[in-house]
Every structure is written in C-alpha cells, then in structure tokens.
Amino acid sequence: MAKTSAIHRNKKRRKMVAQYAERRAELKKQARDESLAMEDRFQAQLKLAELPRNSSKVRIRNRCEITGRPRAYYRKLKVSRIALRELGSAGLIPGLVKSSW
C-alpha cells in the first residue's frame, strides 16, 4: 500500500488540473499563435508560468485505485497488476481468468 499522503497529493493534483485546464489551454493557444505579436505571445507565456505547477497535466501520476501503487498500472481498469490478479482470482472482473497449469 502506498503512503496515504502520496495518494492524497495525487488527488489534489487531479483536482487542480481540472480547475485550471481551460485557462492553461487558452494561454497555450495564445503563446503558440504566430499571428499574434511577439510581445503578446511572451505575455501569455509569462502568465502561463505564473500558474501553479501542480495545475500541469504532466504532474499527475497514474495510481492504482485500490492500493495506490504507482507502477504496473492498467489504464483501462485503473488498477495495478497485483490488484488485477487478486480481483481476477476472486472472479470480480468479467472475462478474466487467472491461468494455472
């Protein structure tokens, strides 16, 4: 099990990304728009840099919903390989059968 502080930190980042997503998208659009003057583009870049770092989408870490494990994460199911195996063995995931021979 991951530290609960790491799990809560990641949830806080997800919330902040959602909060600032529209503003970041608009500023990025302005900064990349070559039809605008160079000064306006630079101002948009400075405003983008003033936003909180945790509002950036790349700072989110995919974590298992059950254990909080950051590695071996299956995006489709939002669980780690270990949790997936346990759920599969318990028969809680339809169509998944743990192989044994």
Image (cartoon, rainbow, N blue to C red):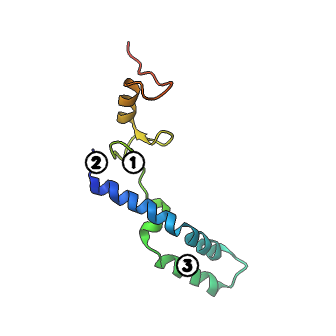
At 34% across and 47% down in the image, what residue appears?
68
On screen, 84 above or below 100?
Answer: below
Q: Which of marks 3 and 2 is nearer the N terminus?
A: 2
Disc 1 residue crowd, few under 14, some 14–19, many 20+, Cα 10 Å: many
Res. 45 mark: 3
Q: Nearer the viewer, residue 83 or 50?
A: 83
Q: As drawn, is 47 to the left or to the right of 39? A: left
Q: What residue type is labelled 1?
A: Arg
Q: Are marks 1 and 2 in contact (CB under 8 Å)?
A: yes
Are there few (<14), some (14-19), or many (20+) residues within 10 Å of tag 2? Answer: few
Q: Residue 63 carries which label?
A: 1
Tag 3–tag 2 contact (CB < 8 Å): no
Specify whether 3 is left or right of 46. left
Q: Quadrant of residue 27?
A: bottom right
- The Cα atoms of the two marked residues, 1 and 2, are separated by 9 Å
| Residue 50 drawn at (x, y percent) | 47, 79
Q: Which residue lies furthest to the top in this view?
A: 101
Residue for point 27% across, 44% down: 1
Q: Residue 2 carries which label?
A: 2
Q: Tell me the residue at 47%/60% (across/down).
A: 58
Nearer to the camera, 61 or 14:
14
**Label 3 CA crowd tier, 10 Å (few <14, some 14–19, many 20+):** some
| The C terminus - image quarter | top left
Q: In which quarter of the image is residue 6?
A: bottom left
Residue at left offset 45%, top offset 42%: 78
